[in-house]
């Protein structure tokens, strides 16, 4: 399988992957992908707006982080929830494996996935990769992680086995899931320190103003 | 499935590509720690003609697997839980009542007669002989022991099932208290629609109506009294603790009913708040006989719930 060298591919618009564009909706410029609408977002022809307030990855792109995504890559998405973000990912990426642990949101995920032939829903626990290692292919180009659980760094380390050596981990760390009582900065330091066991951190940025107490991280396997 | 097959470990190993159900079952049940290049292996083994076809089959199979898992989880509904917790209470109450009768009766023939369900078990298991040929006492003991076993099994069921039905509520309140709240409200949806002030006094209806009729103080807490956050707090501050706890429980019930996602931060927020409240009465707060264990099995809340303030 061809492995796109992520960083060098020419982008359509700044650092945005092919298939994601900044377009105008009702007079404001917003991120957008092409696909069936999922959550009542504004549309313009085939394009639908990607709300960075509802999506950590959307916020990372809106904040111009170097995600290394170029479009068409294989993706393992951990914490797909109702499919808001993962539907946009499936719009511009290749095969997209969407792991979600809770049955209720998975029902919505199934709906978002229905018109997307390369979005594979998996009801599984991201902390237990052995429960989906027989389905998700090896050497995926990107792991997107947005799980609200303690031990977010450990989840990323556990799932490193799926990631290509040149792949990218795009992680949104939620400070309040680790410890509500602690200062987010301290939580982020700990998460980053643990991540260093398996990843080289390329970029980190707080996701304000879109998401409070969240840190966006771009990393590659060590 | 043979280990030597090049596809060993893949979900499609040994699965007929046309058998959607078999594929979905394999996706749900198989395990494999190390991922491999499944699309290539599947094409190589003849499972699919090309990668495109493999992904088409995978899409159908994963969708079917997720649909089945979702509908299974949703059948694990709150109605079952409500019946189970009520049956558990009935069994426990009846077992205790009969055990009391038994102890009184057995006391007339056995000077060392013990009390409670434990004593009934001793008699039923034959660990203790009665100095009489009368089978009637032994038979009653068996009945009590069986009822006690039923109650234990129902409790296990409740402890196992509640986290599936209401994960956030169960982790915040403990599975048994969570199930009781759902039962008192008449279902998870009803509980999710109740204001936190109502949840605070669920189970203290007698005290509440006495208060509303004007001849009693307002109850500070209902069944949530059994939670450590309330019971472990100094009596002067229990109203505040109960209010804080009820607030978080209301949020947990709503999240469980409307979204189903886990919100682990609720626990931390509650602990934080309770610590602040308990600090008002100065460090060591728990002055009465709390048991720091499960704290979920005390039905005697009504009277105490409405005593002061």
Image (cartoon, coloured by chain):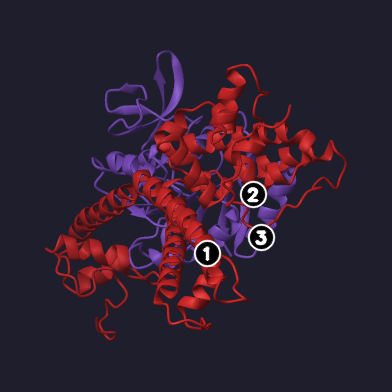
Chain colours: A purple, B red
Q: Position of residue B53 (x, y in %)?
A: 17, 58
Kindly identify which chain the residue marked by label 2 belongs to: A
The residue to which callout 1 is attached is A158
Where the N terminus of chain B falls, by quadrant?
bottom left
The single residue placed furthest to the top in the displayed view is A27
**Camera sees residue A147:** no
In this image, B243 relative to B14: left or right?
Answer: right
Q: Position of residue B282 (x, y in %)?
A: 88, 41
Q: Observer-nearest residue: A107 or A184? A: A107
* Marker disc for residue B281: none
| Circle 2: element type | helix
The residues tagged by marks 1 and 2 sit, at their Cα atoms, a distance apart of 17 Å
Callout 2–callout 3 Cβ contact below 8 Å: no
* Marker disc for residue A178: 2
Picture residue at 60% right of the left edge, 29% below the top? B207
Q: Earlier in the sequence, mark 2 or mark 3?
A: 2
The single residue placed furthest to the bottom in the displayed view is B4
Q: Position of residue B156 (x, y in %)?
A: 46, 61
Label 2 vs label 3, nearer the camera: 2
Callouts 1 and 2 in the same chain: yes
């Amino acid at each position: 399988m061809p492995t796109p060298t992520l960083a060098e591919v020419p982008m359509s618009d700044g650092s945005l992957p092919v298939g994601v564009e900044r377009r105008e909706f009702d007079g404001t410029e917003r991120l957008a992908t092409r696909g069936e609408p999922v959550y009542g977002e504004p549309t313009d022809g085939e394009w639908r707006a990607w709300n960075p307030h509802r999506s950590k990855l959307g916020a990372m792109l809106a904040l111009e982080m170097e995600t290394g995504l170029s479009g068409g890559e294989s993706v393992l998405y951990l914490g797909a929830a109702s499919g808001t973000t993962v539907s946009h990912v499936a719009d511009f990426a290749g095969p997209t494996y969407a792991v979600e642990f809770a049955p209720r949101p998975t029902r919505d995920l199934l709906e978002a996935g229905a018109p997307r032939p390369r979005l594979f829903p998996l009801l599984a626990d991201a902390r237990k990769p052995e429960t989906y290692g027989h389905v998700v292919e090896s050497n995926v180009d990107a792991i997107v992680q947005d799980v609200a659980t303690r031990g977010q760094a450990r989840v990323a380390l556990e799932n490193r086995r799926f990631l290509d050596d040149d792949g990218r981990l795009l992680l949104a760390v939620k400070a309040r899931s680790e410890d509500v009582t602690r200062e987010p900065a301290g939580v982020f330091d700990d998460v980053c320190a643990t991540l260093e066991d398996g990843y080289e951190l390329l970029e980190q940025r707080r996701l304000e103003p879109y998401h409070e107490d969240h840190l966006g991280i771009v990393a590659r396997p060590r | 499935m043979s280990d030597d097959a090049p596809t060993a470990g893949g979900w499609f190993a040994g699965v007929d590509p046309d058998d959607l159900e078999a594929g979905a079952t394999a996706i749900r049940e198989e395990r494999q720690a190390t991922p491999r290049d499944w699309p290539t292996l599947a094409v190589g083994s003849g499972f699919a003609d090309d990668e495109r076809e493999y992904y088409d089959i995978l899409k159908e199979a994963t969708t079917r697997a997720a649909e089945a898992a979702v509908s299974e989880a949703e059948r694990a509904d709150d109605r079952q839980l409500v019946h189970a917790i009520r049956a558990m209470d009935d069994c426990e109450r009846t077992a205790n009542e009969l055990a009391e009768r038994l102890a009184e009766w057995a006391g007339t023939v056995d000077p060392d007669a013990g009390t409670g369900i434990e004593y009934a078990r001793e008699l039923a298991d034959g660990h203790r002989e009665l100095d009489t040929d009368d089978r009637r006492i032994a038979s009653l003991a068996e009945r009590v022991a069986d009822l006690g076993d039923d109650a234990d099994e129902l409790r296990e069921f409740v402890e196992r099932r509640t986290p599936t039905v209401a994960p956030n509520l169960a982790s915040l309140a403990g599975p048994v208290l969570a199930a009781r709240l759902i039962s008192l409200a008449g279902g998870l949806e009803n509980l999710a629609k109740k204001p936190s002030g109502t949840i605070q006094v669920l189970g203290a209806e007698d005290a509440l109506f006495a208060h509303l009729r004007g001849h009693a103080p307002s109850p500070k807490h209902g069944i949530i009294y059994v939670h450590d956050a309330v019971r472990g707090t100094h009596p002067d501050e229990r109203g505040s603790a109960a209010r804080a706890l009820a607030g978080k429980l209301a949020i947990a019930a709503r999240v469980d009913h409307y979204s189903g996602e886990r919100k682990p931060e609720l626990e931390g927020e509650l602990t934080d708040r309770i610590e602040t409240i308990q600090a008002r009465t100065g460090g060591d707060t728990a002055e009465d006989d709390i048991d720091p264990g499960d704290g979920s099995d005390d039905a005697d809340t009504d009277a105490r719930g409405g005593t002061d303030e």
